[in-house]
Image (spheres, rainbow, N blue to C red):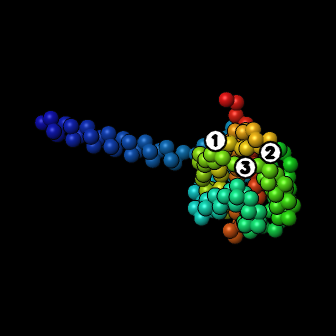
Amino acid sequence: MKKVVLSVLVAAALFACSEAKKEETSSAVEHIYKPTYTDNFKIGDPKNVLLAEQFHKYLFEKDFKKAGEAISDTALFHNEDGTSIKGKAAILDFMEKSFTPLSFKNYEIVAIIPTEGENGHQWVNVWDKADIVLPDGKVQKMVWVDSFRFQDGKIVMFEGFGKTPKE
């Protein structure tokens, strides 16, 4: 008799869990603030993750030619400092001037997620951190959230956010 009662309880628990999950996934979220860009993301093309990682690698190696191959001719970069740069040539010039005097140590990707918006845009969102060796030899810790939008295997837009954490 114990086995029958136990079996009924287990079956009821499993049924209750599966019903609760169905209910949870079918209810829509009523946003307080409606996103203006897109609201329905799904996992994007994982190949773009490797492109974003390679782009970082080329910058750290100061191989600006290879970094440039990853950028579309009409790319738009919105940088951490609030500036915007349009066009591959201007972006490469900025990167060369900015990254040449620096060295990156202990680089780590905390999370990297490819996403696709309901509009078909392919993004890779990267949470990363590193120790930056400045020209005077001092080391500055940095953390970033970088978002790259890809089209046809090239970066067409970049949104960068960075800060130096207090220790």
Which comes sooner in the sequence, label 1 or label 3?
1
| Amino acid tagged 2 | Pro
Circle 2: element type: loop
Q: Position of residue 56 (x, y in %)?
A: 68, 56
- Residue 156 lies in quadrant: bottom right
Q: Give the vertical position of 145 relative to 66 (above or below).
A: above
Is label 1 in a helix, a strand or a loop? Answer: loop
Side of 111 where 83 appears, left or right: right
Quadrant of the rendered structure where residue 136 is?
top right
Residue 162 appears in the picture as rendered: no
Neighbor class of circle 1 (other Cα within 10 Å; few <14, some 14-19, many 20+) is: few
List the residue tagged with mark 2: 135
The amino acid on which the numbered mark 3 sits, given as a three-letter code, is Ser
Q: Is residue 115 placed above or below 127 in the rendered structure?
A: below
Which residue bears the numbered disc 1? 30
Marks 2 & 1, CB-CB < 8 Å contact: no
